[in-house]
């Protein structure tokens, strides 16, 4: 595995916790074991951006079971749904070289894009490009209070969280680390029951990333068509070189809608594309329910 992180990766959602243990395969990361656990419905409560941890005891009990069934380990990476974050591509005229000063500038820029006190956010960012016209920055943020509450429960269970990142970005990492460089536009969809993520990359540079909740007012196909119209109008993304779709149980009609809207062949991301095939084949039915999330787990080690 290219990036050095603990072998254990956890994927937490409001109703489930997935534990995966990874190792080195012949060419790709190998998923040595994986198991999902039900999270009680009262564990989290809806809130702005990131859900609040409403029942610490419920999450603690789930972690107790995980540790009991998976052996001794004390560090893990944690992946959360994209909708628990705000992912922004910021355009700024300048950015200070000092990290502390640059942090203040990025937070101030975020204040103009969302009605949230930027001081309440946990923020991670990186410079995408610098030019005479300005600086482009990728900023990933979430509400700090619920993240701190989650970390506290994990710490009490004897698990140190060394990394917290969105699921979708790690699926993308898992795919693109295996691709040849390109300057063309690529489209990425990560589809879930409650939300979906759309991203456009020009070469290795993200042009657009957005996660939207599905509220039942429109079907997923209608949401995809609205996204396609927006991207064509704002980014001029008429020519998509490659289109990737990740998700569990994605129907043919959804794939057909994406292919039609963007006039592009759609490639479904499979766990077998990014994980050791022998190990992936031994995981059984969990791949059908959590294949996309397991692919994201391999993305933690991409780079």
Image (spheres, helix red, strand yellow):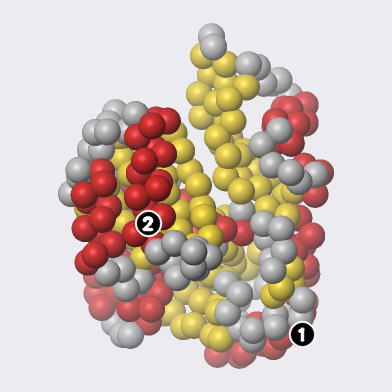
Q: Residues within 10 Å of mark 1 (few under 14, many from 20)?
A: few
- Give the left or right position of residue 241, taking residue 129 as reference: left
Left or right: 262 in relation to 118: left
State the image coordinates of residue 108 (x, y, percent, origin top left): 75, 31
Residue 257: x, y in percent? 26, 55
Q: Quadrant of residue 64?
A: bottom right
Residue count near mark 2 (Cα–Cα under 10 Å), binned few <14, some 14–19, many ≥20: few
**Is residue 138 shown left or right of residue 98?**
left
The residue located at (31%, 40%) in the rendering is 186
Query: Residue at left 39%, top 62%?
Result: 220
Toward the viewer: 212 or 150?
212
Image-based side of 80 in relation to 293, left or right: right
Q: Which mark is residue 57?
A: 1
Residue 152 at what x, y percent from top left?
Answer: 78, 69
Tell me the SS state at disc 2: helix
Q: Nearer the viewer, residue 107 or 22?
A: 107
Separation of residues labelled 2 and 1 (CA atoms): 40 Å
Q: Secondary structure at mark 1?
A: helix
Image disc number at residue 272 = none
What residue appears at the point 46 percent right and 38 percent down from the top-left corner?
Answer: 208
Res. 102 image quadrant: top right
Q: For the image shown, how many numbered marks are present on the structure?
A: 2
Residue at image x 40%, y 46%? 227
Residue 143 drawn at (x, y percent) = 73, 55
Could you tell me if residue 240 is visible in this image? Answer: yes
Of pointers 2 and 1, the one earlier in the residue sequence: 1
Where 72 sits versus 50, above or below?
A: below
Residue highlighted by disc 2:
222
289 is higher (above) or lower (below) than 231: below
Hey, which residue is sitting farthest front in the picture? 217
């Amino acid at each position: 595995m290219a990036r050095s992180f603990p072998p254990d990766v956890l994927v937490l959602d409001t109703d489930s916790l997935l534990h995966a243990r990874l190792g080195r395969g012949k060419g790709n990361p190998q998923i040595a074991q994986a198991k999902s656990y039900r999270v009680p419905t009262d564990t989290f409560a809806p809130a702005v951006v990131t859900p609040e941890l409403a029942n610490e005891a419920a999450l603690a009990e789930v972690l107790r079971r995980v540790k009991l069934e998976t052996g001794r380990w004390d560090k893990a990476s944690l992946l959360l749904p994209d909708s628990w974050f705000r992912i922004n591509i910021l355009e700024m005229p300048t950015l200070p070289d000092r990290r502390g000063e640059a942090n203040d500038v990025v937070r101030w820029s975020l204040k103009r894009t969302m009605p949230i006190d930027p001081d309440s956010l946990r923020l991670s960012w990186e410079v995408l490009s610098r030019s005479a016209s300005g600086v482009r920055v990728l900023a990933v943020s979430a509400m700090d209070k619920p993240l701190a509450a989650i970390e506290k429960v994990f710490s009490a269970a004897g698990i140190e969280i060394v990394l917290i990142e969105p699921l979708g970005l790690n699926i993308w990492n898992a795919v693109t680390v295996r691709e040849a460089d390109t300057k063309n536009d690529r489209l990425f969809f990560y589809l879930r029951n409650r939300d979906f993520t759309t991203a456009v990359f020009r070469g290795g540079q993200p042009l657009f990333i957005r996660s939207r909740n599905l509220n039942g007012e429109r079907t997923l196909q209608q949401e995809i068509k609205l996204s396609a119209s927006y991207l064509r109008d704002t980014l001029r993304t008429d020519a998509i070189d490659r289109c990737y779709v990740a998700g569990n149980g994605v129907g043919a009609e959804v794939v057909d809608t994406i292919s039609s809207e963007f006039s592009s062949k759609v490639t479904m991301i499979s766990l077998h594309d990014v994980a050791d095939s022998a190990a992936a084949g031994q995981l059984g039915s969990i791949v059908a329910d959590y294949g996309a999330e397991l692919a994201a787990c391999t993305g933690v080690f991409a780079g």
